[in-house]
Image (tube, rainbow, N blue to C red):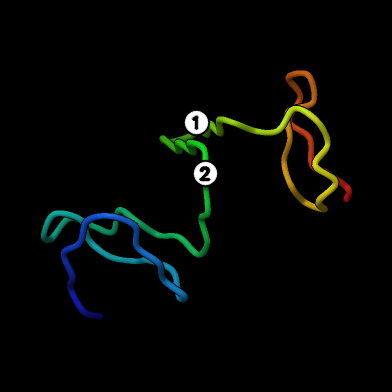
Amino acid sequence: MATTTFSGPVVSTNGFDGAVGGNTPAAVSATTLTTTGTVTIDGTTVVISSLPTSDPSVAGQLWNNSGVLTVSAG
């Protein structure tokens, strides 16, 4: 695995797995993450902002149904 320093958006077709800050154990691992809002994952807390408030009619897409996290059937 190569070591790279970067800033700005990064795209990977095989996900990310590696160290942050030298010999620190792997701190980043992802397969796919695409967002135009804010996604925060901190320990056992996940916060997703800007979810649609009406059914997007896209199978599998999350939406905020009056405060209830709902998965669209499409």
Residue extending furthest top?
Answer: 66
Query: Which one is closest to the eye, mark 1 or mark 2?
Result: 2
Give residue 73's position: percent from left, percent from top.
88, 48
Q: Residues within 10 Å of mark 2 (few under 14, many from 20)?
A: few
Q: Is residue 37 left or right of residue 24?
A: right
Mark 1 or mark 2: which comes first in sequence?
2
**Residue at 72 percent of width and 41 percent of height:** 62
Give residue 13's position: percent from left, percent from top.
47, 75
Q: Are marks 1 and 2 in contact (CB under 8 Å)?
A: no
Whether 35 is drawn above or below 17: the answer is above
Whether 33 is drawn above or below 56: the answer is below
What amino acid type is highlighted by mark number 1? Thr
What amino acid type is highlighted by mark number 2? Thr
**Residue at 52 percent of width and 44 percent of height:** 36
**Residue at 48 percent of width and 36 percent of height:** 38
Give residue 66's position: percent from left, percent from top.
78, 19
Residue on which the image places disc 1: 45
Separation of residues labelled 1 and 2 (CA atoms): 19 Å
Q: Nearer the viewer, residue 30 or 64?
A: 64
Give residue 14's position: percent from left, percent from top.
45, 75
Q: Nearer the viewer, residue 15 or 19?
A: 15
Q: Residues within 10 Å of mark 1 (few under 14, many from 20)?
A: few
Residue on which the image places disc 2: 36
**Residue at 74 percent of width and 47 percent of height:** 61
